[in-house]
């Protein structure tokens, strides 16, 4: 059984971005707002620009609305900073999806704040493993470094993924 999309998931968290000054609010997002829709369209367009079609695993909005996915957005003073999602693969395994920082807010700690939040939520749900797929190209190097700093290690394909030279798979064992 999948976790309730909004009932069970924490709806809000305040924290500090990497610059130590800005307050970031992370909240469950129903994907209905124009800001998040624009950011997700930018995300998909960018993934299609850098990756061959068969290697684009970013989900469209309709895919993110499935019951096994909880989606969050990060905001500061009413401005959208970024987003990320958690997909339940099974009762002990989650997958990070749709991590994206607005181009205007890159290198400010937004992705780290979202990643830390999602890792915390996965642990709260009792998952033992948290995995992700990202690109193997140079454009994805900052993301791979972020995940490695958070304790993710390289692994083979998981869930429905297959070996793909354009994909890198990473996983993290979560403490109970």
Image: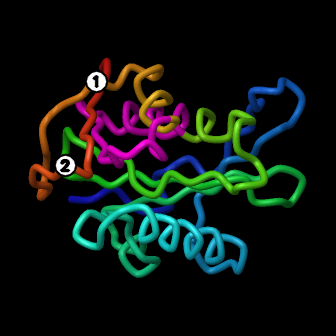
Please identify the quadrant where the C terminus is shown.
Answer: top left
Q: Residues within 10 Å of mark 1 (few under 14, many from 20)?
A: some
Please identify the quadrant where the N terminus is shown.
Answer: bottom left
Q: Report the residue at 34% width, 69% height from top.
A: 67
Question: Residue 115 at x, y = what percent?
Answer: 52, 37
- Does the magenta-highlighted stretch encompass residue 136? yes
Q: Which residues are magenta?
A: 115-141
In the rendered view, would you say 48 is above or below 169? below
Position of 63 with respect to 98 (left or right) is left
Nearer to me, 165 or 42:
165
Q: Which mark is residue 165?
A: 2
Alpha carbon separation for disc pair 2 and 1: 17 Å
- Does the magenta-highlighted stretch encompass residue 129? yes
Q: Report the residue at 56% width, 47% height from top.
A: 10
Question: Residue 55 at x, y = what percent?
Answer: 26, 63
**Numbered label tally:** 2
* Corner quadrant of residue 50: bottom left
Nearer to me, 122 or 147:
147
Q: Which residue was labeled with disc 1?
A: 153
Nearer to me, 118 or 176:
118
Q: Secondary structure at mark 2?
A: loop
Nearer to me, 124 or 104:
104
In the rendered view, would you say 100 is above or below 34? above
């Amino acid at each position: 059984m999948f976790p309730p999309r909004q009932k069970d998931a924490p709806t809000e968290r305040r924290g500090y971005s990497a610059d130590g000054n800005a307050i970031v609010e992370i909240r469950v997002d129903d994907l209905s707002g124009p800001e998040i829709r624009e950011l997700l369209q930018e995300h998909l367009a960018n993934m299609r620009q850098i990756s061959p079609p068969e290697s684009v695993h970013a989900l469209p909005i309709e895919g993110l609305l499935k019951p096994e996915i909880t989606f969050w957005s990060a905001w500061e003073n009413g401005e959208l900073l970024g987003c990320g999602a958690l997909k339940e693969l099974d009762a002990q395994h989650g997958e990070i999806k749709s991590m994206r920082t607005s181009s205007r807010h890159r290198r400010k700690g937004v992705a780290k704040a979202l990643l830390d939040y999602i890792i915390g939520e996965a642990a709260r749900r009792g998952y033992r493993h948290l995995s992700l797929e990202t690109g193997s190209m140079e454009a994805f190097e900052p993301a791979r470094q972020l995940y490695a700093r958070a304790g993710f290690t390289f692994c083979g394909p998981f869930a429905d993924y297959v070996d793909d030279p354009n994909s890198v798979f990473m996983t993290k064992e979560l403490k109970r």
